[in-house]
Amino acid sequence: MTENKINSAAYLVSRGGEESSAATKAEKLDKNNAAVASHHATPENGMAFEEVLAKKLQPNHAYGIKLSQHAQKRIAERQLDLDAQEFFKLRQAFDTLKNKGGKDSLVVTPKAAYIVDVDQRSIVTAMDKNDMQENVFTKIDSTLFIN
């Protein structure tokens, strides 16, 4: 019986070493999980990290069309109204130009004129249709007028 107690004590001591090692591993895992969880924490604005990252990766993308920073600036300066109907027309214009082999194109709508990069589905710049008078458009390979 005494021998069994000694063997049991030796077993517990040897297992205790493993258990404490397992406990240390569990503590490290908890710390790693806490670090990972901090990446998923929501910033003050209430957006999750993944949402912020996605927004940063595609900040100028709306309705399947990208707006260059230059285009954003021109649209704001020129107070162009880009409503849903205008975006729908532009989306159709990109598809039409792509099918016809356009690369860098001028798209003229009833509201405005846009220089677009067809392959990137990006608006490079924009101007009010009335401001088009006597302007020279260079480096374009196609023009599309939309009613």
Image: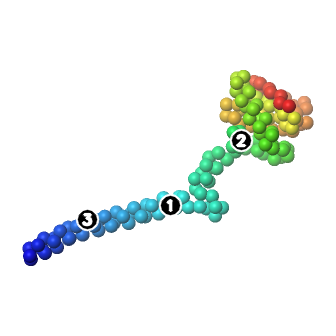
Q: CA distance from mark 1 to mark 2?
A: 32 Å
Q: CA distance from mark 1 to mark 3?
A: 28 Å
The kind of residue on which mark 1 rests is Ala
Binning the other alpha carbons within 10 Å of mark 3 as few (below 14), some (14 to 19) or many (20 upward) gives: few
Camera-side mark, 3 or 2: 2
Quadrant into which the N terminus falls:
bottom left
Residue 4 in the image: state x and y as whole percent. Answer: 11, 72
Assess whether mark 3 and mark 1 are in contact (beta carbons under 8 angstroms): no
Residue 17, by quadrant, is bottom left
Nearer to me, 64 or 107 = 64
The image position of residue 28, as x and y in percent, is 38, 63
Which label was assigned to residue 37?
1
Viewport quadrant of the C terminus: top right
Label ID, residue 63: 2
Which residue occupies 22% across, 67% down? 15
Q: Could you say whether the residue bearing mark 1 is in a helix, strand or loop?
A: helix
Can you tell which quarter of the image residue 130 is in? top right
The quarter of the picture where residue 131 lies is: top right
Residue at x 64% of width, y 64% of height:
44
Q: What residue sits right under mark 3 in the picture?
A: 18
Q: Earlier in the sequence, mark 3 or mark 2?
A: 3
**Seen in the image, is 59 located left or right of residue 140?**
left
Ranked by sequence position, the earlier of labels 1 and 2 is: 1
Q: Amino acid at mark 2?
A: Tyr
44 shown above or below 84? below
Type of amino acid under label 3? Glu
Looking at the rendered structure, the secondary structure element under dot 2 is loop
Residue 12 coordinates in the image, percent (x, y)? 20, 70
Using the image as rendered, state which of residue 14 and residue 8 is in the foreground. Answer: 8
Q: Residues within 10 Å of mark 1 (few under 14, many from 20)?
A: few
